[in-house]
Amino acid sequence: MPDRRSTPPKGTRASERPSGAADAHVAKELPSNASAFPGAPPSIPSSVFDLDIQDAITLKGIAGSPGVAVGPALVLGDLRAFFVRRHVHTAQIPQELERVQQGVEVAQSTLKAVDARMPKAMREASAILEAYQMMLSDPTLHDLISAKIRKEKKCAEWAVSEASEEIVAMFGPRESGDRDAYISERRHDVEFVCDRLLRALVGEESHHAVRLEEPMIVVARDLSPADTASMVREPALAFVTCVGTRTSHTSIMARALEIPCVVGVSNALEQIRTGDILVVDGLTGQVFVHPTDQSIRDARQRSEQHLAFARRLLSARHKPAVTADGVALALKANVELPAEAILAVDHGAQGIGLYRTEFLYIDRTTQPGEDEQYEVYRAIVEAVSPQAVTLRTFDIGGDKFASTFQMPAEMNPALGLRAVRLALKQPEVFLTQLRAMVRASAHGDVRIMVPMVSSVHEMREVKRLIAQAREQVRARGQAFEEHIPLGMMIEVPAAAIMADVFAREAEFFSLGTNDLVQYALAIDRASQSLAAQASPFDPAILRMIKFVTEAGKTQKIPVSLCGAMASDPLAACLLIGLGLRELSMEAAAIPEIKEAVRRITVPEAEAIAEQALACDSADAVEELLARELAPRLIDLLAGIAEDIPPTRSSMPPSNET
Ligand code: PEP
Ligand code: MG
């Protein structure tokens, strides 16, 4: 799974840049013939191509999964279950509580059934579906539901619906710009789980899979992993959703299925009706409704070119990452879910450079125990072995919210009790994690990394606690590796500037540019209004990166970079010039970055980096990269192979009316 909270660099390829609110060039009234989903099978017109000539409309969203598709739309209705609010008599309370219990079992077995049907390629969804099953037995949810039934005498459905709203409200207000994609995903998870429970209560217990009688483009407000999974064997040409980001479940699933997808098209349901011909451009994040014959022809050509491009990239994904002059690099993956480790290896990752363990603590009401964590870490280590796995200790706080931690309300959480600061304030919680990590070291090459370090004192305290964890594990007679390398994230300017000093405390560094940009430029990483200024190409950031790589070289400790900029082809080449030889990124970007680095020599990259360091602004750096590097990476930046002409035989049949 890609970096959930990564801030795409300003100079990143077009497909990664959110293009803001949907924008209909031609407004028009459309009849509402959207089918209910998943309650009722969709009605598909007999001949979807039997359409009047209509005005072309361009809708803008976010490119969720690359590729270009042409075909008729299938518009799915809202996902919410329908129920009647009613009060119950005191005597009926036990019965309502029992109904909730049965509903949970039905919803869990429905999710299990969807999971069982899931093909191998969707392993990632399996992990999500398992998490949903666990969420259905979450004590917070159950306490809230039973309080509403017992004290407020509300029927089971009403209690579930209100409990869902209350938990969702704990995530804070919804903001139109989706201030934090990660929070929005968690909110959606709660809504989805409660909706499954509601459906079980109202008797829609089976998951009504959508059946596509012909290849169609699925348009919906949102698609949950279970919904997407139910369509795996259907001829879905593409997905378009009103909500979501590049890191939302729909995008992740679409990329796993290699289906083009555009998310965040806020007015898709108003502008598209079932049967409308669409062009979905998952490279640019655009959806064309009623496209002209010419744009359909162009789309098919782009589709062919993208497929050829993707095939070519994937075929070389297991080859080593070496520059044109033969310098070997290590390209590793950032993962959040255990299932992603397999995906990472499949994309040619040379290990896991960042495992964000905080995801074990989120979306639950109790802390994960040592054994549970150990099993997760062990699974990842075994999946990737003999390659190394860098386990980052939890980075909770700031934009990463976990209700199980008692945290003070702070004016500025990003500058408050976060990551290692929180870990050191709650040593028992931290020790539980450290013991699990120490035990996982018995199964492969494990490294431990500490986030958000800003003082040497923190590193020394972490070392003391690791030694304590090791002794506790030893006392129990459990296996572990005596020496586990301990590294730190360089994501706070203080750590970057003191890198030469920190190099005596840490065995490796990993530059976290997502936070380094936030803290060095004083721009909230979630700020929409300042997103354009939060550029990792800012010379202030480049100078810090250079300083850290130099310190690593002098002190002979490895330096990696795991911020989102590593997955941008232009940035990756620049980073080589700044001295980096290891990058960690979302798994899906690895084949592309391998290809990018093969096209540059180290002296070329160094010459560009030198010029970049002398620039006075991020814009000047971007202009430099556009001039010096973009021409040789143009296909990677656009996601299509310009040199591959489309072959008529592999093109879909013409649908022009
Ligand atoms: C970073 O800050 O660049 C980083 C990789 O960590 P995260 O995005 O998890 O804060
Ligand atoms: Mg960070």
Image: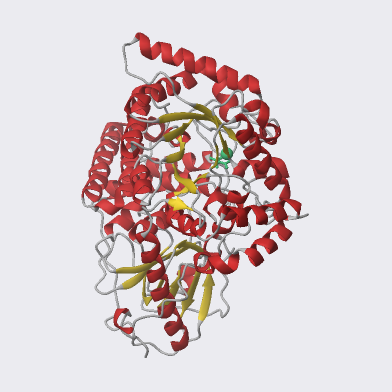
* Residue 200 coordinates in the image, percent (x, y): 27, 47
Seen as rendered, the residue at the extreme top is 475
Seen as rendered, the residue at the extreme front is 325
The structure residue drawn at horizontal position 30% and vertical position 48%, both measured from the top left corner, is: 123
Number of marks present in the image shown: 0
The structure residue drawn at horizontal position 69% and vertical position 30%, both measured from the top left corner, is: 498
Q: Is residue 51 above or below residue 552?
A: below
* Residue 105 coordinates in the image, percent (x, y): 24, 39
Q: How is the image coloured?
A: secondary structure
Residue 157 in view of the camera:
no
**Foreground residue among 413 and 380:** 380
Q: Is residue 645 above or below residue 345?
A: below
Seen as rendered, the residue at the extreme right is 616
* Residue 122 coordinates in the image, percent (x, y): 30, 52
**Foreground residue among 140 and 185:** 185
Answer with left or right where residue 466 lies relative to residue 348: right
For ligand 1, which image quadrant applies?
Answer: top right
Query: Which corner quadrant holds the C terminus?
Result: bottom left
Residue 388 in view of the camera:
yes
* Residue 323 coordinates in the image, percent (x, y): 50, 54
**Foreground residue among 437 and 124:** 437
**Foreground residue among 532 and 81:** 532
Q: Is residue 512 above or below residue 438?
A: below
Q: Quadrant of residue 412?
A: top right
Q: Quadrant of residue 254?
A: bottom left
The structure residue drawn at horizontal position 60% and vertical position 25%, both measured from the top left corner, is: 421
